[in-house]
Image: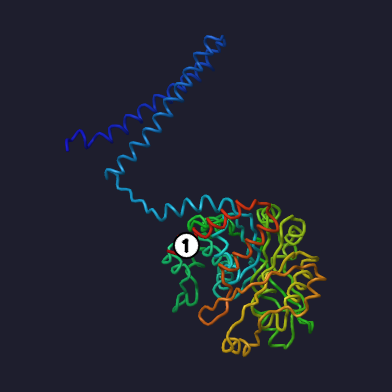
Amino acid sequence: MKIVDWLRPGIKVKRWVMLGSMGILFIVFGVLEFVNRRLYSMYYISFYLFLIASGVFVLYVSIMQGMRSVIALINKGYLNVSIDSRKLENLIYEKRLLVKGPKIVVIGGGTGLSTMLRGLKYYTSNITAIVTVADDGGGSGDLREDLGMLPPGDIRNCILALADTEPLMEDLLQYRFKDGRLKNQSFGNLFLAAMDGISSNFEEAVHKMSSVLAVTGKVMPVTLDNVILKAKLKNGTIVAGESNIPNEAIKQNTSIDKIFIEPKNAKPLKEAIDAIMEADAIILGPGSLYTSVIPNLLVKDIAEAVKKTNAIKLYVSNIMTQRGETDGFGVEDHIKAIFKHAGGEIVDYVVINIGRIDDELEDKYKEETSHLVKIDNIEELKRLNVNVIEGDFIRIKNGLIRHNSEKLASILIETIMEKKLLYDRRKIIEYFYLSERLKQNKNK
C-alpha cells in the first residue's frame, strides 16, 4: 500500500473540517454584514441571505462527508474503536421502548421496593422512586448518627435496582465489611456518604450517585428534613425510632395503633410533588407497612398530592405478614391502615399474591408467626372501593420469600396501560414486544 493511500482517509477528514470552517465563516460574515451595514434593499438582503444559505449548505455537506470519512477510518482500522453489536442493539431498543413508557411514581422503601424497581426499569425510563428516610437501624443508622446525614440504605438499594452497571460494580457497592470499625457497613452507604460530603445537600448527592451509575429514572428522598418515626401502640405506649417500633410491639405483646413523624411539618421535595401530579400511575409498596410505606404519606402534602392526581393508584401488598407490624393482617387491614394515615381513600387497585409455597417453608415462617397475606373479607374491600389484581408473584431466594420482579412489573404495566393509557392495540403489541426483546438481550 502506498503511503498516500494510507493517509488518504485522514486527509479527507481534515479537508471536510476546513470546508466546515469556511461554511461557518460564510454564516458569520453574512449575519455581521446584515447587522452592521443596515442596508435593507432587496439587493443587499438577497446578498446576505445568499451568504448565510451558502454557509449552511457548505457546513451541512462538510458534516455529512466528515462523518463518512471517520467511519472509513474506523472500518479500515485506523481508529481503535470497538463496537459491541449486542450493546448497540440494547441501546436502540432502550431508546425506542423506555421513552414511550408510562410515567410511574413508586413510594415506599425497604427490600420490596427495590425488588419491584428491577422489573419496572425494563418497561419505562419515566420512573420516580420516592423513598422513606426514617430508617435509624443498621449501617444507615450509624451513618445518620455519626455524620448527621439522612439514612442512605433504602436509597442506595433503589439506585442500584435502577442502575445499568456491571455485576462487579453492584457487588462492590453492596459489599459489607466483616471486621473492624466498619463491620456490617455497606460500601454503597459509604459511597453515598462521601457524595453527601462533596454536595450541597443530600438530594444533590443522590442525583450525583445516580448519574455515576447511569440510573434509569430518578431516585429521591421524600424529604430532606431529619425526621424521626414514632408509634403509638394500642396499650398507649409511645415508641420512638423506626427500628424500635416492631421490637417494642413484640416485647409488650401489643400492636401498632398509629404512627407519626417529628417534625410533623416536614417538607417534601418539590420534585416529588411535581412527579406525583404528572404521573400516569402511583404505586405504593411493597415494603413494611408501618415503617416503609406509610411514613412517606405522613410528610406534608404527599398524601394530598396522591389524592389529587389523576394517576391510577395501586398498592402492592406484601406476600407475608411482618411480626410486630402486621400480625394477623389480611389485605383489607393493610388498605385500612393506609387510608387511616392518609386521611382518605388513595388506592384504586391492590395487587395481591395467590401463589403457594411449599409446606416446609411455610412452617418455617409460621415459627416466626408470619403468614401469607390473604383477603379475609372481600366485602370489606368492595366497601373501600378497591379492586383486586391477583397473580403468582412468589420467588424464593436464599430460603426467603420475595416478589418475582419480572412477573410483578409485567402485571403492573399491563394494568396501567389498560386502565389509564389510551394506546391503540398495535402500539401496545409493539411496546410489549420491545420490552421482551430488551429483557432477553440484557439477560444474555
* Number of numbered callouts drawn: 1
Residue displayed at 82% across by 71% down: 383
Where residue 109 sits, quadrant-wise, is: bottom right
Q: Position of residue 435 (x, y in %)?
A: 53, 58
Left or right: residue 394 compared with residue 173:
right
Residue 394 x, y percent position in the rendering? 58, 76
Residue at 70% x, 83% y is 327
From this view, report whether residue 33 is shown above or below residue 409: above
The amino acid type of the residue labelled 1 equals: Gln
Q: Position of residue 134 (x, y in %)?
A: 65, 69
Q: Nearer the viewer, residue 219 or 316?
A: 316
Which one is in front, 277 or 241? 277
Quarter location, residue 169: bottom left
Task: Note whether 5 is above or below 229 in the view shown.
Answer: above
- Residue at 60% of width from left, 51% of height from top? 427
Q: Is residue 138 above or below residue 114?
A: below
Is the image coloured rainbow, by chain, by secondary structure, or in one colour?
Answer: rainbow
**SS class of the residue under badge 1?**
helix
Seen from the viewer's position, the closer of residues 177 and 198 is 177
Residue at the farthest front position = 426
**As drawn, is 89 to the left or to the right of 225?**
left
Q: Residues within 10 Å of mark 1 (few under 14, many from 20)?
A: few
Quadrant placement of the N terminus: top left
Residue extending furthest toward the left: 2
Does residue 102 appear to the left or right of 212 in the view shown? Answer: right
Res. 229 image quadrant:
bottom right
The residue under label 1 is: 440
